[in-house]
Image (tube, rainbow, N blue to C red):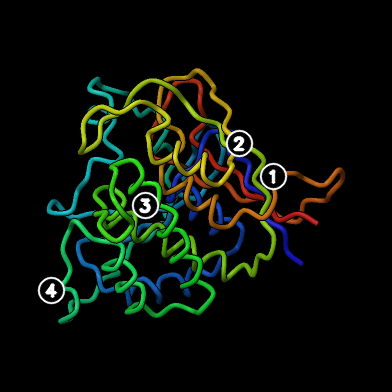
Amino acid sequence: MKTLYLECFSGISGDMTVGALLDLGADEAMLRKTLASLPVQGFEVKISRIKKSGLDACDFDVILDAEHENHDHDMEYLYSVPHEHPDVHEHTSDHSHSVHTHEHNDYEHHTHEHRSLADILDILDHTQLTDRARATANRIFMILGEAEAKAHGTTLEEVYFHEVGAVDSIVDIVSAAVCLDSLDVQEVVVPVLYEGCGTVRCQHGILPVPVPAVSNIAAARHLKLHLTGLPGEFVTPTGAAIVAAIRTSDTLPEQFTIERIGLGAGKRCYEGASGLLRAMLIR
């Protein structure tokens, strides 16, 4: 039985998760084939090796066109002050490669940018996913939907996703589900999520960290948070929902051996935080 341990010492996001799982050995060819079937437009995917905090890591980057850009990695937009990015693109490998992973078909003309949960589940139904990967992606979005509905005082049927329904979040969640399926993980241990403090800007205005969706997920799913006191949003709603959907335990065995280690790089840079997610296959 394969057990995955996610060490969220610098938070967790969708792209960090996918990068770490690819670094563990998830099937990149399978992922690209699945993303090519996703009936969503406006993105391409780049998978590369980068140095972050001096460590070699896998960077999973969803590159959006101008129409779909949501400023998720724009530090000046998020925090209203300029932030330096000293190590994000340091020593990027020449072996990185990007691919356009959207197909233009009649289905995508019926979708829109502010999507309901039903819209997103319909997108997943039209994507070439295994039953297990689809079930995982559905569960992640259900958890996100419940958290957003509670935050906005509405129902699961009536809630509309904004940042969470954006193209990059859909790609991140589908990719995480495909990678987990590829690795054939049965157990997932996540002891605690390290989070920052302060505020962050989103489409609804300036919100406190942890943002309401993350707080709601942590409360509903009994996720343990450790507030570091460092300024910044380390745990994104997508990252929290992934943990809530796949975690089977918050306690590591007293003894274990590590079979493989993967590092996934985040895009945001915070002083005092590495911006890395470490994933381990343990036995």
The answer to whether marks 4 and 2 mark residues whose Cβ atoms lie closer than 8 Å is: no
Q: Give the CA distance from mark 3 to mark 2.
A: 28 Å
Instruction: Give the SS element for disc 4.
Output: helix
Residue at which label 1 appears = 250
Dot 4, crowdedness within 10 Å: few (<14), some or many (≥20)? few
The answer to whether marks 3 and 1 mark residues whose Cβ atoms lie closer than 8 Å is: no
The answer to whether marks 2 and 1 mark residues whose Cβ atoms lie closer than 8 Å is: yes
Residue at which label 2 appears = 224
Q: Is residue 233 above or below residue 100?
A: above
In the rendered structure, which amino acid carries the disc numbered 2? Answer: Lys
Which of the two discs, 4 and 1, labels the residue nearer the N terminus?
4
In the rendered structure, which amino acid carries the disc numbered 3? Answer: Asp
| Residue 20 in the image, given as x and y percentages of width and height | 55, 51
Q: Quadrant of the N terminus?
A: bottom right
Instruction: Give the SS element for disc 2.
Output: loop
Residue shown at 81% from the left, 57% from the top: 283
Which of the two discs, 3 and 4, labels the residue nearer the N terminus?
3
Residue shown at 45% from the left, 33% from the top: 234
Dot 2, crowdedness within 10 Å: few (<14), some or many (≥20)? some
Q: Give the CA distance from mark 4 to mark 2.
A: 41 Å
Residue at which label 3 appears = 61
| Residue 269 in the image, given as x and y percentages of width and height | 40, 30
